Image (tube, helix red, strand yellow):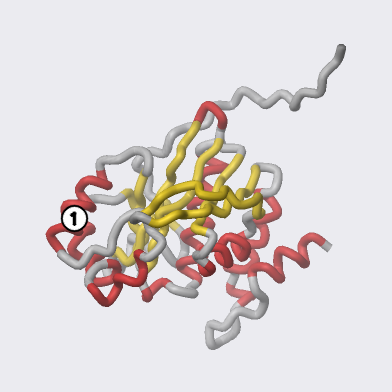
């Protein structure tokens, strides 16, 4: 008796991330290094930034020495694989470490990878640089590392993360109930993804949003990323 099965997948191998920097017009992502600790602490550490760590696995980090030791530990990891987000292109001497992003739950055999452990200093909030950083990370996963699925997971109470996933083009897949215990508290996890067949459409929207034509002389967007993506579907 014939039974339904999924389609065959091409035999292109997915690659684990390597210590490669990702460069855009407004931002660069560089592999995390211990020497980033001192500069990034003022944007991500201290009591004034403690609120950034509410939904993260660790933190907050109010002691510079603890932060430095943590960065040293994270710099050696391959899963999660951390990037430092710079405030501008790496070629600009004024650029400094103001955020972090990572690849995690990296499964080359099944060609899936997650982006997460994302924490951005206030300097990056609601900027073209922040959006371009996400674009670079997702693009690298699909086009250079050959993944078929890029995942995004968030505490279901973390409304900014849920909104960011939707804005960037991730598709909501459901809630994993009582999925984790983080900092002694129950976490229900919202799952999102973009797949390789969706990526060309999502990519086109990113690139149109990032273009100079989408911003007025005051730097205000003419169309939102979601509006552009929806217009491309019509």
Viewer-closest of 94 and 188 = 188
Viewer-closest of 176 and 223 = 176
Lateral position of residue 159 relative to residue 50, left or right: right
The residue sitting at 34% across, 38% down in the picture is: 78
Furthest toward the left, the residue is 65
Q: Position of residue 87 (x, y in %)?
A: 36, 68
Furthest toward the top, the residue is 1
Lateral position of residue 53 relative to residue 145, left or right: left
Viewer-closest of 69 and 198 = 69
Residue 170, by quadrant, is: bottom right
Q: Is residue 15 visible?
A: yes
The C terminus - image quarter: bottom right
The residue sitting at 65% across, 50% down in the picture is: 173
Say which residue label 1 marks.
35
Above or below, 219 against 61 in this view is below
Q: Position of residue 49 (x, y in %)?
A: 30, 72
The residue sitting at 55% across, 65% down in the picture is: 164
Q: Position of residue 149 (x, y in %)?
A: 60, 41
Q: Is residue 88 visible?
A: no
Above or below, 54 against 125 in this view is above
Q: Residues within 10 Å of mark 1 (few under 14, many from 20)?
A: few
Lateral position of residue 38 relative to residue 11, left or right: left
The residue sitting at 70% across, 43% down in the picture is: 197
Q: Position of residue 214 (x, y in %)?
A: 63, 75
The N terminus - image quarter: top right
Lateral position of residue 80 relative to residue 139, left or right: left
């Amino acid at each position: 008796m014939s039974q339904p099965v999924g389609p065959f997948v091409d035999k292109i191998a997915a690659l684990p991330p390597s210590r490669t920097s990702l460069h855009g017009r407004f931002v660069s992502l560089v592999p995390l290094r211990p020497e980033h600790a001192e500069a990034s602490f003022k944007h991500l550490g201290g009591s004034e930034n403690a609120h950034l760590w509410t939904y993260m696995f660790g933190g907050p980090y109010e002691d510079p020495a603890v932060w430095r030791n943590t960065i040293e530990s994270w710099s050696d990891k391959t899963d999660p694989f951390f990037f430092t987000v710079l405030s501008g292109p790496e070629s600009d001497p004024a650029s400094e470490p103001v955020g972090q992003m990572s690849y995690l739950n990296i499964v080359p055999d099944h060609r899936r990878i997650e982006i997460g452990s994302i924490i951005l200093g206030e300097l990056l909030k609601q900027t073209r640089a922040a959006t371009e950083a996400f674009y670079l990370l997702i693009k690298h996963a699909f086009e250079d590392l050959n993944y078929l699925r890029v995942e995004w997971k968030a505490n279901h109470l973390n409304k900014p993360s849920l909104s960011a996933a939707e804005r960037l083009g991730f598709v909501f897949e459901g809630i994993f109930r009582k999925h984790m215990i983080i900092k002694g508290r129950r976490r229900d996890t919202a799952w999102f993804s973009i797949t390789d067949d969706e990526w060309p459409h999502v990519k086109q929207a990113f690139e149109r949003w990032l273009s100079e034509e989408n911003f007025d002389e005051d730097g205000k967007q003419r169309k939102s990323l979601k509006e552009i993506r929806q217009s491309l579907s019509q």
